[in-house]
Image: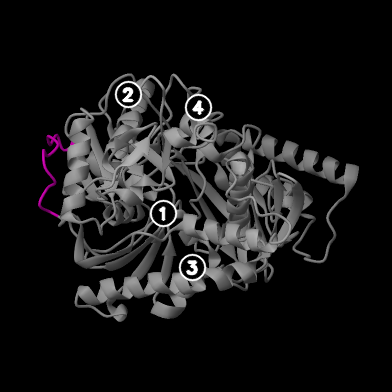
Amino acid sequence: MSYALGVDIGTSYTAAAVWEAGRVDMLQLGTRSASIPSVVLLRDDGTMMTGEAAERRAPAEPARAAREFKRRIGDPTPLILGGTPFGAETLWGCLLRAAVEEAARQRGEPPAAIVVTHPASFSRYKLDLLDHAARAADLGTVRLLPEPIAAAIHYASQERVEPGAVLAVYDFGGGTFDASVLRKTPDGFELLGQPEGLERLGGIDFDEAVFRHVLSSLEGDWDGASDPAARPAVQRLRDECREAKEALSYDTEAIVTAALPGLHTTVRVTREEFERAIAPRIRETVAALERSVRSAGLTMDAVDRVLLVGGTSRIPLVAATVREMTGRPVAVDTHPKHAVALGAAIEAGQSLAAGAAPAAAPPPLLPDRAAGGGEHPTASESPAPAAPPAAAALAPGDAPPRDGGAAAGAAARGRPRGLVFAGAAAAAAAVAGAAFLLFGGGGDDSAPPAAGADRTRAAATATATLAAAAATTPTAAATAAPTPTPTLAAGTARITGITLSGSRYSVSFETAGFQPALPGQHVHFFFDTVPPQQAGVPGTGPWFVYGGGSPFTGYTTADRPAAATAMCILVANPDHSVKQGTGNCVPLPR
């Protein structure tokens, strides 16, 4: 069956998604995650290596590798790989080709339609370069789509967006920042005013801020950062700094291990230090957003909500600063790293569903429509992407979005959005006892967690009970006696149901006495393979920090550990420490 492909080449990572028969799923580009590094390496034989394989070899052959080159698109100065000059757009085309070839390898045929994304702030000159690179990759017709349009399309597939609503899209990725204003139309979205961007600001700059802070802490002890022999150790230190930056979104401090030639020590980095360093740059992004709103002839009061996308937007200070400076409601995309790729796939799929031939040039609906791409490790140089555990059994099919980027999807949008877990209410009642065992009982924050063997036995008992509840057949659920729903105690939360929309879990939940918010009191979601005592500990997990409303849609079936049978919730303090006994677990749909 024909399928459509959406590709998003980011400065740091690349993702791709597939649309087929009305459902959208991420394409597993990496061996352990859907996205892969945006890295290209020129081998001795003149062929290109991309993605994970290129990243693995890059430390040994740095002169042959290129990364973060999305920032260089439009720069007439070429990048030199192994003595050979390349334009940044040519490397972009290599990544796009690798992503499309991987899709064809996994699906057994090439995609019938391809949409790739680009920053809305790209000039016509840059868009022409991308269009030429896409044609040079010999992939047939490739459509180009602004990233904020793709992000809005994906958001509208998850949340109702009424025609006429105005969204400000705040896209803070790994290497660039873009701000755009969109209006929902009956057929999709239109750009208003002039997009604004900061092409030299992204998450990698915040990584660098942590790296420089660590180096300054080592002054007098080590000064070999420019020594070529120390390059592998310095790269490991940079990786440590990036992980510390990510950890500071969940914890108030992080420890960086500096294992360098002649020196082995640790450096403590606090969230306060980190936020003090990045706060001026975040204010710059909000100023750019306000300029984009003004260019549309609007004031902030006319903006219905600010949509945050991009991995860097998950830093708590970002949402807090945007909310404070704009005074507008903030909506955080359910999966900021994949929203653009998913939206591009929806756009491509709706055109394919309508039977429309892909346009040979950007369609006139939007100004400055263009491309942004995808990349993937070559099959010959990296292991074939492994299918997520039990993904086939857990992916009955994505329903088409309620709102999309083209009117062509109207027929598909009339279909149901997902499969409701049979007997969810009865299953929730069946696992109530297990949830209390797992979380220490009835909502008492002060109850100490079980320790040692007792904790292990309690977790095993809870898991067994949850598994038994999950195995309950619809017939048994239908004949079970009704169970009264207990009233939630103040300061607690509970999952009330879980459905599947394609490969994404939609988790309905409720709270008592508070509204989840970041920064502030919020909730953590996690699978039952994670001990509840570890659901707020950096470096453990997976667990998901969430400060939005119901439903929670941050997990896909690809995120589910093989042994997981249920999803759980706990209430968390502003510092991300979780309160035992404040949540429950509900079996995952099968």
For residue 318, the mark is 3
> In the figure, is residue 183 to the left or right of 314?
left
The circle on residue 104 is 2
Q: Nearer the viewer, residue 221 or 465?
A: 221
Label 2 – label 3 distance at C-alpha: 38 Å
Q: What x and y, as percent, mark residue 204?
A: 48, 54
Kind of residue sitting beneath label 4: Ala
Distance Cα–Cα, label 4 vs label 1 = 29 Å
Name the residue beneath numbered marker 4. Answer: 387
Q: Amino acid at mark 1?
A: Gly
Point out the tag, 4 or 1, that comes first from the N-terminus: 1
Identity, as a three-letter code, of the amino acid under mark 2? Ala
Along the polypeptide, which appears first: circle 3 or circle 1? 1
Identify whether 316 is placed above or below 393.
below
State which tag comes first along the sequence, 1 or 2: 2
Query: Label 1, on which residue?
Result: 175
Q: Quadrant of the C terminus?
A: top right
Residue 439's label in the rendered image is none
Q: Is residue 590 above or below residue 116?
A: above
N-term-proximal mark, 4 vs 3: 3
For the residues labelled 4 and 2, the Cα–Cα distance comes to 16 Å
Is any atom of residue 304 visible in this view?
Answer: no
